[in-house]
Image: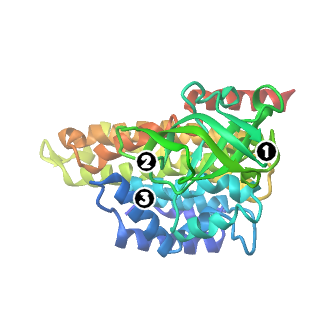
Amino acid sequence: MADRSFLDWPFFEDRHRDYAERLEAWCRENLPVDHSDTDAACRRLVDMLGAGGWLLATAVDSDTPAPLDVRTLCITRETLARHDGLADFAFAMQGLGTGTISLFGDAGHREWLRKTRAGKAISAFALSEPRSGSDVANMDMAARRDGDGYVLSGEKTWISNGGIADVYTVFARTGEAPGAKGISAFVVAADTPGLEIAERIDVIAPHPLARLRFNNVRVPASALIGKPGEGFRIAMSVLDVFRSTVGAAALGFARRALEESIKRTSERTLFGAPLFDLQMVQGHIADMALDVDAAALLVYRAAWTKDMGAPRVTREAAMAKLYATDRAQSVIDKAVQLHGGDGVRHGHIVESLYREIRALRIYEGASDVQKVVIARQVMGAGA
């Protein structure tokens, strides 16, 4: 059983502790699911999470709007990741995919939230492009004003839920100004004429990913989220909220790796004694536990700070995301080593964790980019 003592930390309220216990019980009963068909598994997971009420946390309630509770998002991602990486993915994309609508959408846009929070529609966040991944301000995709609407042309790539989503939040250049100030955000239904799945992308931990092609896709002016030219600020604000949850998912993977390693080294005999009796093994376990706790402190500091009303948590979220994902990679690598040959056996839990963790150090801001963000925040604070 994974360590749950962190729930006693002052970052949390009783409602968070109760939520975590209920979700843990649900996960033990329902996860993992069969991953043999990735698309089908994701659809099933979204449906299950919606039926269980767990997707309510991913977006605001259209009837009684209130700020997203980032601590709840982080608890959910950590818990789901510890049980089933694809379940974490399914939950996370319902949040990120509709984050723009939750935080900046109008009443018409928020009709989508009734479906996504219930698990009746799947959402996606279409930001990255072939030429501009980390350099969002350099995007090429255009949205040209035409009469009473806009015409979108270009490509997006590495889009999570691409190919199975019902609705995409799409960022495109509307040209109000050069660079970041000339980008806008739009809600685009997946069945809009001209929107094509150009390529399905296979990765080491199977998730539904795709390259999207927009062939003169016409959307009404009402599809615009916020004002023209506000898209970059909107995208960064959404990532500011959800970036710490990436660290939470990494934390869940790391906790599971530590849990499996404690079990393995306690049960495995080497040279006539439990593997855990070797001082080198004890050193590895100690390093893993230290990394897990330090990551948890950074993740839940960022979440708590946002929930306490901070307008932005750029520095805190970047630190949480960078440290938690990088250290989870180290924790899981040690777990593979402690499991020996079983650690690289296809289908073993630590082997799947090894594949799952790697992408988290890239998406929603690669580790190297997070270092730049942190450095600029530190220099700005000291100026």
Horizontal and vertical percent position of residue 150? 72, 43
Horizontal and vertical percent position of residue 210? 45, 41
Alpha-carbon neighbours of circle 1 within 10 Å: few (<14), some, or many (≥20)? Answer: few
The amino acid beneath tag 1 is Gly
**Left or right, 92 with reference to 186:** left
Residue, disc 2: 254
> Residue drawn at (64%, 39%), measured in percent from left and top?
319
350 vs 176, nearest the viewer? 176
Residue 317 versus residue 49 in the image, above or below = above
Task: Work out how far the residue at label 3 is from the one at label 2, CA to CA, in angstroms.
Answer: 16 Å
Proximity of marks 2 and 1: CB atoms separated by less than 8 Å: no
Where on the picture, by quarter, is residue 104?
Answer: bottom right
Residue, disc 3: 87
Q: Is residue 25 visible?
A: yes
297 vs 303, nearest the viewer? 303
Task: Work out how far the residue at label 2 is from the one at label 1, CA to CA, in angstroms.
Answer: 52 Å
70 vs 320, nearest the viewer? 70
Alpha-carbon neighbours of circle 3 within 10 Å: few (<14), some, or many (≥20)? Answer: many
Q: How many labels, in total? A: 3
Label ID, residue 147: 1
**Precedes in sequence: disc 3 or disc 2:** 3
Could you tell me which quadrant the N terminus lies in?
bottom left
Where on the picture, by quarter, is residue 336?
Answer: top left
Nearer the camera: disc 2 or disc 1: 1
